[in-house]
Each structure stands twice: as structure tokens, then as C-alpha cells.
Image (cartoon, grey):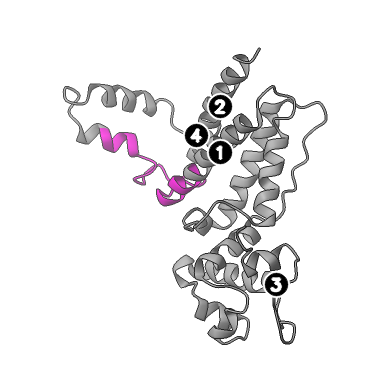
Amino acid sequence: MTELPRYLQLLWGREPEGRRGPRPGRTIEEIGAAAVAVADREGLEAVSMKTVAQAVGFTTMSLYRYLDSKAELGAVMLDLAYGPPTITYPAGSGWRERISLWAKEIAARRLAHPWTVELAQASPPLTPNVLSWTERGLEAFDATPLTSQEKLSALLAVDGWAQNHVRQSIQMGLIGPVQPDSPQGDYAGLISRLIDPERFPHLATAGAESLDDTDEDFYAEEFERGLTLLLDGIQALIGRHP
């Protein structure tokens, strides 16, 4: 059986196996919160074992009493940035409404800490808050005939798409309203000036149509469109069950 890393034992409130000496002067949550503060303030690239150790008044070597690597520190940071889920599913709500609430709420946590969508994850999630989000997501499918594996796959598809949408929207500067005279706001117009309709007939048509239907809030509107497509696919999967 794989031994639980120390950081997981600490996050789950378990006494690390074989630990000797005095109890550490900081909690794993305090260390993670210091790292989150550095990432929020200076960006993910500013986070290192040294900068986090300094933020909590440790030497770098002292930090290794809690964590074996920067990858483990990243897992703690992600867990604290997400925090515990606070979703309340309305009584009598269907699975579509529930999973939509879930997807929007976890996306909001990512938007509050944009570095979360750039953080490399070395393994599938094992931390308490992230697994609590998974639990609530699976709960959204309670009234469906989906198998446990189908629920997990559906949740992974929704979450993976939502995370990528957050990442792309941030990188392209499309969070919130954009200025009409900016590259983001005049994207369709710029394309129309660059392409030859004979060479790019489909793109030319799509660009002309988008000029008549400009997103006032790209992030929010495309979130709804993309999520609807995914939910329609899950609905089709449900419909194939006896």
C-alpha cells in the first residue's frame, strides 16, 4: 500500500507517521495560505520553497518537515484556493441546474485566483477541499440513471472544459466587458480586414455573423454556450439508459 505523504496526513488532520520531536510551529494550512498570498500578489512564478518559507518565518529546510516538494506545495495551494464548496442545490432542482451551479461556482473560485488554471498538477486530486468539490459534483447527478463511472466521466468533461475556458479567457484578456476599439473588442473586424473570403469562406461568413452578434461579456456568454453543449451531450447519454 502506498504510504500517505506528510502533507496529505496534515491536511486530513492525521498525525504524520513516525514523527518525532516537538510539534511543528505552523500548520500546513498556514503555509499554504502564505503561498496563495504570494501567488495572488506576485504571480505563480514568484512561489518557491524559499519565498514561502520566508513568508512564514522559516528557513527553507524547515519547510521540508511539512512538504517534500514544490509539487506538494502546489497541491496545498490549490486546495486552499478552492476552499470548501458552499453550493446549495435548490429543493426539487434537476441535474442540469445542479451541475450548472457547481460548474459556475468552481469557475468563480478559479477566477478569484487566476494562477490556479496554470498550476501543474502532478497527480489526481487527493486533498480534502478538492475532493469535497468532486463529491458535490457527483451529488448533482443523484437523480439520474448514470453509473458511477459515467458520473465521474461527465464531471471530468464539465470541469476540464470549464477550467480551460477560464484559462483561455484570462490569457486573451476576455474577462468582463472589453473596449470596442481594442483587439479583443474588434476581433471580428480585424479578421475581416486580414482574410480573403475566397480562401477562408467559412471564416468570412462566421466573422460577418459575429459582427451582428457581438458578445458583451465573452466569458459569461461563451460559458453558457459551451456548458449547454456539454449538458446536452450528458442528456443524450442519460437518454440511452433503459
CA–CA distance in space, label 2 to label 4 = 10 Å
Foreground pick, 32 / 198: 32
Q: Are marks 2 and 4 in contact (CB under 8 Å)?
A: no
User: Label 2 amino acid?
Assistant: Thr
- Disc 3 or 1, which lies upstream in sequence? 3
Residue 48 shown left or right of residue 12 in the figure: left
Mark 2 or 4, closer to the camera: 2
Where is residue 114? Give x, y as percent.
52, 56
Mark 3 or 1, closer to the camera: 3
Mark 1 or 2, closer to the camera: 1
Examine the image and state in which quarter residue 214 appears: top left
Check disc 1: other Cα within 10 Å, few if <14, some if 14-19, many if 20+: some
Which secondary structure, mark 4? helix
Mark 4 or 1, closer to the camera: 1
Residue 228's label in the rendered image is 2
Q: Are marks 3 and 1 in contact (CB under 8 Å)?
A: no
- Disc 2 or 4, which lies upstream in sequence? 4
CA–CA distance in space, label 4 to label 1 = 19 Å
Q: Give the position of the N terminus as an image quadrant.
A: bottom right
Which secondary structure, mark 1? helix
Q: Is residue 221 above or below residue 171?
A: above
Mark 3 or 4, closer to the camera: 3
- Disc 3 or 4, which lies upstream in sequence? 3
Residue at point 70%, 72% (across, down): 17
- Disc 2 or 3, which lies upstream in sequence? 3
Circle count: 4
CA–CA distance in space, label 2 to label 3 = 47 Å
